[in-house]
Amino acid sequence: MPGQIKIDDGAGNYTILTNGGSLGSDKTITLPNTTGTMALTSDISAGGLKGAQKYKLTADISTTGTNDITTNLALSPSTIEGNYGSLISESSGIFSFSETGYYLLISTAGSTNNTDNSYAQIYIQASDDNFSSSSSIGRITNRMKSSGHSTGAFVNILHITDTSNDKVKFQTDITSGGIIEGSTGIGFTTFTFLKLKDL
């Protein structure tokens, strides 16, 4: 038999009869005898991305050796671009998370060279102790002939369990003649964070 809602004892108790009509499976909902608003304890409509933010490098980097990217990073709202939410913050090149969860990180690096066979790399550095220590979790390497252009990408899934200590930053590794490209317009070198799921 189809499910039913049965008005019960007049004290605000309503019994939901299951399809099988089994008394052992009946459920009771008790409504308070007062004026108020009922609310769900969780959002059953929740789904999809929890947040999406893209940062871009706004100026070229040509300093040789291995160096942290600490400046010229900005959120990327160019024509029809946008960011959803504000779960990621950046300070002196260190990216922090305001919520725990699973995040997709997409890193891209655009580069050009002034010298044959020079290279320009970006390392993705991660820490679980607020950068008292760190480890590399990805690398983008662009190598080409003089005056060439190249773009590389790397994808990571981040498991953020501690918003005080779990952080990421980016490092360049450049030989003489190599350039990591940045621009206030085109996103040559970008760092995109998508929150996929809560813990």
Image: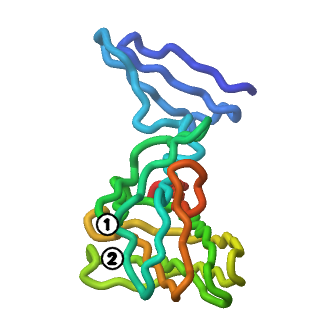
Q: Secondary structure at mark 2?
A: loop
Residue 36 at least partly seen: yes
Residue sitting at 55 percent across and 33 percent down? 26
| Residue type at the position of mark 2 | Asp
Look at mark 2 in the image and give the residue it sits on.
Answer: 128
Looking at the picture, tell me which residue is in the foreground, 133 or 180. 180
Q: Position of residue 106 (x, y in %)?
A: 58, 64
Q: Is residue 197 visible?
A: no
In terms of image quadrants, where is residue 127?
bottom left
Q: Position of residue 51 (x, y in %)?
A: 49, 47
Q: Read off the residue under disc 1.
A: 162
Q: Between residues 39 and 126, which one lies in front from this camera angle?
A: 126
Circles 2, 1 touching at the beta carbon (< 8 Å):
yes
Compared across the picture, whether 1 is left or right of 117 comes to: right
Q: Is residue 99 left or right of residue 197?
A: left
In the depicted structure, whether residue 83 falls above or below residue 199: above
Who's the residue at 62% across and 78% down the image?
A: 113
Q: Element under label 1?
A: loop
Which coloring applies here?
A: rainbow
Q: Amino acid at mark 1?
A: Asp
Position of the C terminus by quadrant: bottom left
